[in-house]
Image (spheres, rainbow, N blue to C red):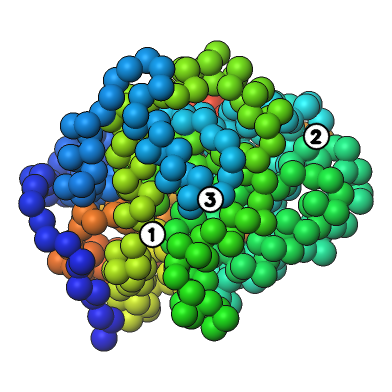
Amino acid sequence: MAKFPVEPFRIKVVEPIRQTTRAEREEILRQAGYNLFAVQAEDVYIDLLTDSGTSAMSDSQWAGMMVGDESYAGCRNFFNLEEAIQSITGFRYFVPTHQGRAAENVLFTCTVEPGQSVPSNMHFDTTQANVIARGGEPVNLLAEEGLDPTSHAPFKGDLDIDKLEAFIQQVGPENVPLGMLTVTNNSGGGQPVSMANIRATGEVLHRYGIPFFLDACRFAENAYFIKLRDPAYADTPVLDIAREMFSYADGCTMSAKKDALVNIGGFLAMNDEALYQRACQQLILREGFPTYGGLAGRDLEAVARGLWEGLDEQYLAYRIGHTRYLGDRLVEEDIPILEPPGGHAVYLDAKRLLPHIPQSQLPGQALTCELYLEGGIRGVEIGSVMFAREDPETGEMVYPSLELVRLAIPRRVYTQAHLDSVVEACRRLYGGREQIRGMRYTYAPPLLRHFTAQFEPL
Ligand code: P61
């Protein structure tokens, strides 16, 4: 029987949640055009839409908000954040941004020219969209086993190093302004990247003079997986593992809404002084002055404190164990998930769960809707709605190899009983899976389609 980890905190503030009836949910879903992003949060019982910005902050973070210095220039919280970022990442320069995609926008505006390619293990959708918005081409070079939902390999976020080198030679290094790794790999199941793979990615890129950036949203969870799964790091403090991960890169983008345990915030960090200067120009244009960058002083303080809390090993043991519990319980019920469970989320495998629905009929979206109907639980489709793209030459739809529904777990928010009720809803859904029907679009915007698309059941 799966074991739930003991929480290394107690609860001081609570927020009521309310279960609705199935009849109410049917009406809510119809009115939302079968898109869970259009459902009001109050109509959701357990909200596993995202782990982004949904953490419960600690008493120390809330106390830090009260010492927010709201000066336009040079507020003290900026320097606290600078100390945390430099100490943890080792990067010399950083600019705060209001969240991760703003850091991506600044970075790609400063680096990517139309027609150039940005390889990665796997881009998340905002990264992909920000590269495309610059006229660039995002390229995913995930190693084969990362695409097999049944493989139990320890580091399924690894990039295929041979493919990376072949790709650079094929397009020419002058057409690759930077390379990236997403740690952990969110689009591919929240799977970690090994230290050897981070090092090797840096070596290949640097051999061709190409800068290497980490998409570091979940760097602490990735570092903890390295400690758990790579015997060479079993006795290394997670902070040192994180420092080594960053040491192979030239910079990072960070959505602090994940491993820094805040509700809003992010940053772009780098070693290159010239790039930093260009980033400051972009920042001033789009986000704000470089010592606040789109955030209030109090938010900077919460990020500074959260970065350290996110690296606490007792917290990380609980965090990874919490997600593992949900995954193990679903496996006990024979419900197909992407294995092993990720760091921040468990991903239902819609292809195996609904084999009777072809990808053109959006099985992931159908599953997302059914889970809401069954238990008032909100997950997010990470499959054809999020990632299918039209082939520019043939005009045909190219579907992603993974068709997933992500159950992302907010940090320090839900208890064992909450997760058990998720399992119970999944069990009921699984029992009636053959009755679930596919869906079709009634509206689909061209970019980041899943946020605002509308559907109807077939
Ligand atoms: C998430 F449905 N992630 O996982 P920002 N890189 C990576 C992310 O996971 C990420 C960002 C960059 C979210 C929020 C989200 O379609 C969606 O602070 C690996 O959100 O700008 C964000 O960071 C961007 C959910 C984003 C979505 C886009 O839930």
Circle number at residue 311:
1
N-term-proximal mark, 3 vs 1: 3
Q: Quadrant of residue 26?
A: top left
Q: Which residue sits furthest bottom?
A: 1
- Residue 114, given in percent of the width and then of the height, sits at 78, 26
Residue 74 quadrant: top left
- What's the residue at 51%, 45% (across, down)? 86
Residue type at the position of mark 1: Leu
Question: Is disc 3 in contact with disc 1, using a CB cutoff of under 8 Å?
Answer: no
Residue at screen point 41% across, 55% down: 406
Question: 409 or 102, which lies in front?
Answer: 102
Of circles 2 and 3, the one toward us is 3
Q: Dot 2: what SS?
A: loop
Q: State how far apart marks 2 and 3 are (Cα).
A: 28 Å
Question: What separation in Å lies between label 2 and label 1 (alpha carbons)?
Answer: 35 Å
**Residue 312: % across, % down:** 34, 62
Q: Which of the two labelled residues, at mark 2 and mark 1, occupies the earlier sequence position?
A: 2
Q: Which residue is mark 2?
A: 116
Task: Give the mark nearer the N terminus: 2 vs 3.
Answer: 3
Residue appearing at x 38%, y 59% in the figure: 311
Q: Amino acid at mark 2?
A: Gln
- Along the horizontal axis of the image, is 10 left or right of 240? left
| Front-lying residue, 300 or 79 | 79
The reply, left or right, for residue 113 in relation to residue 216 is right
Separation of disc 3 and disc 1 at Cα?
12 Å
Question: Which residue is label 3 attached to?
Answer: 89
Secondary structure under tag 3 reads helix
Whether residue 420 is situated above or below residue 57 in the rendered picture: below
Q: Secondary structure at mark 1?
A: loop
